[in-house]
Image: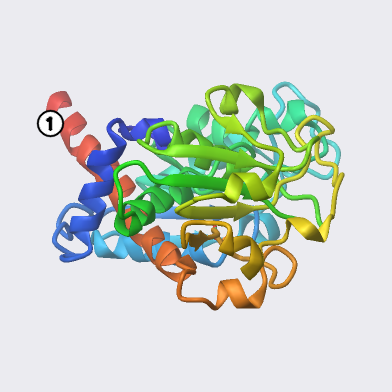
Amino acid sequence: MKHYTHINDLGNLQESVQEAIALKESQTKDKALGEGKTICLLFFNNSLRTRLSTQKAAQNLGMNAIVMNFGSEGWELEFEDGIVMNQNKSEHIKEAAKVIAQYCDIVAIRAFAKLESKEKDYQEAVINGFIKYAGIPVVNMESAIGHPLQALADAITIEEFKTKKNPKIVLSWAPHPKALPHAVANSFVEMMALQEANFVITHPKGYELDAKITKNATIEYNQDKAFKNADFIYVKNWSSFKDYGQVLNTDVNWMITADKMKLTNNAKFMHCLPVRRNVIVSDEVLDSKNSIVIEQANNRTFAAQIVLKRILENSVTSSAVES
Ligand code: CP
């Protein structure tokens, strides 16, 4: 695997999930693989889990990790070709990406959707700019469209907690005062397409995700109906995709409560975090024994570790072929 920008880059998802679970027993067994290698983690947006878990994964593999809050500390980047740079942007991606590649072997990037223009967000200028100009492997730590490291951690968590071959898994929208991107929900749907499960998405009308991503998924607009017999409830807010970036609905009845969870088959509760208590989910549910959000967050390390391991293994193979 050269880059990790999408869950499909892994190839066989189940193999990666099983390898990640096995890795937990011996977290530093591949320490020699990353010895002498460096990863740069560039954050154009805030993070807790992604930053710490990816750093820990790199360390488990023997790598050095350099972290930069690019959004607040880096020069503002220009991505357009042929532009006269006489406004506020100080450095072009062409130089920035090539310079960063001098200091590291892998670059990992977080650059959220701005939710101002669907067309601009979908160009994925930051991730694609680094892929085009850096010449080193690029890892997506949440881009405008996807969060594949989160999706892999979610797959690991589901595998660990499922008690049947074909669990019912529900992705539910919940209300939020701010407009949030679609990345986590998109990658979760894409990951579910690779799983054996009865998968249902529930959200109010107007909150349909990109139809290209949900094309094979079941959508149920009645949340109570969707929750019936569910084994996992995965909750996330996202803004409207059609009315791009708009908050169309803040109906508190969509919040996940103990009464809603009673409709399920004693379902496990999942959320990628951070989560707003008593907005997205009630305290009662988040603090219940069925909530597996901490285990889910823990799995972010092993998801990142599998991804970095695959990239390092690929670079060893590529160097052997070249020499
Ligand atoms: N779930 C997740 O990506 O968390 P952070 O935004 O804190 O990294």
Question: Which residue shows up at 66% across the image and 62% down it?
Answer: 256
Q: In this view, does 113 lie above or below 278?
A: above
Q: In which quarter of the image is residue 316?
A: top left
Q: Which residue is drawn at 84% across and 55% down?
A: 251
Sort mark 1 into few (<14), some (14-19) or many (20+) by Cα contacts within 10 Å. Answer: few
- Residue 216 at what x, y percent from top left? 52, 23
Q: Residue at (57%, 31%) from the top-left corner?
A: 218
- Residue 35 showing in the rendered view: no
Task: Compare residues 266 and 146 and report the one nearer the observer.
Answer: 266
- For the residue pair 290 and 179, the one nearer the viewer reads as 290
- Residue at coordinates 83% horizontally, 38% vertically from top-left? 116
Q: Which amino acid does label 1 sit on?
A: Ala
Tell me if the residue at label 1 has its CB under 8 Å from ligand 1: no
**Quadrant assignment for the N terminus:** top left
Q: In the rendered image, which quarter contains the C terminus?
A: top left
Secondary structure of the residue carrying tag 1 is helix
Report the residue marked by disc 1.
320
Residue 125 locus on image (x, y percent): 64, 32
Residue 67 location, x and y as percent?
Answer: 49, 62
Q: Quadrant of ligand 1?
A: bottom right
